[in-house]
Every structure is written in C-alpha cells, then in structure tokens.
Image (cartoon, rainbow, N blue to C red):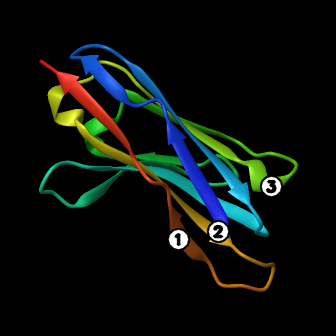
Amino acid sequence: QVQLVESGGGLVQAGGSLRLSCAASGTFFRIRDMGWYRQAPGKERLMVAFITRSGIVNYADAVKGRATISRHNSEDTSKDIVYLEMNSLKPEDTGVYYCGVDVLPTEWSTLQCAWGQGTQVTVSS
C-alpha cells in the first residue's frame, strides 16, 4: 500500500506564495500520475495540477501562470515526491489541498487511486 503525507499548508496573505510537498512511502510497484486537488468548504474536490511520471503537466485554468507542479522520481520508486508552488495567492485559493496519485500495487495490477490526508491552505484578504 502507498501512504501519502502532505506538508506546507497554512495561513498566507493574499499575494503571497506557498510550497506544498507530498511524499509517498510504502510497498508498491510504481506511481504513475501525481496531482494536487483542492476542496473548498461545501464544494467538490477539484484538480489544481497534475504531473505524469515523464513530466507532462496540466493545470486548472484558475491557477495557470501562478502554479508550478514538479516531482522527484526516486530510484526507489516508493519514495516519489510531488511539489506544488503557488504565488500571487488569492482568497479563492483557500481550501484543503489533497495529494492524489495513480499507483500500481504490483507490476500486473490495475491502477488504483490513493489520497493523502490533506493540508489546509487559508489565504486571507
């Protein structure tokens, strides 16, 4: 199984910046895509950014130009890390940020989705 631990959330003033990290650990074959998702109070969880294992990235329109997602693919694939850097933060960026990954438990498994516990980001105006 894969465990995902996020860090880097907190209270930030509008216009500021932050960097979130998500570290994977556990026993599995490989992580494919890694992404960040935001859930605002009373709203559904939405994609902020994701990155494939080969480095192809995609961003939600709301954060394009303000966010950068990157990842470190460990030689020991059980230690992959994904980062999200955001600047020019806005109050509407507030929410719980979840790390989500597509993981192959074994070489012959189908892809499964795994989530971290989430980290709160609050942007004050």
* Earlier-in-chain disc, 1 versus 2: 2
Q: Position of residue 100 (x, y in %)?
A: 49, 58
Q: Position of residue 66 (x, y in %)?
A: 36, 26
* Earlier-in-chain disc, 3 versus 1: 3
* Earlier-in-chain disc, 2 versus 3: 3
What residue sits 31% from the left and 14% below the top?
16
Left or right relative to 42: residue 46: right
The residue at the far right in this view is 75
Q: Which residue is mark 3?
A: 77
Q: Are the residues flagged by discs 2 and 3 in contact, CB closer than 8 Å?
A: no
Q: How many residues crowd mark 1 within 10 Å: few (<14), some (14–19), many (20+)?
A: few
Q: Which residue is mark 2?
A: 103
Residue type highlighted by circle 3? Thr
Image-quadrant location for residue 15: top left
Front-lying residue, 72 or 6: 6
Left or right relative to 93: residue 65: right
Q: Which residue is mark 1?
A: 113
- Determine whether 47 is above or below 70 in the image: below
Residue 90 - label: none
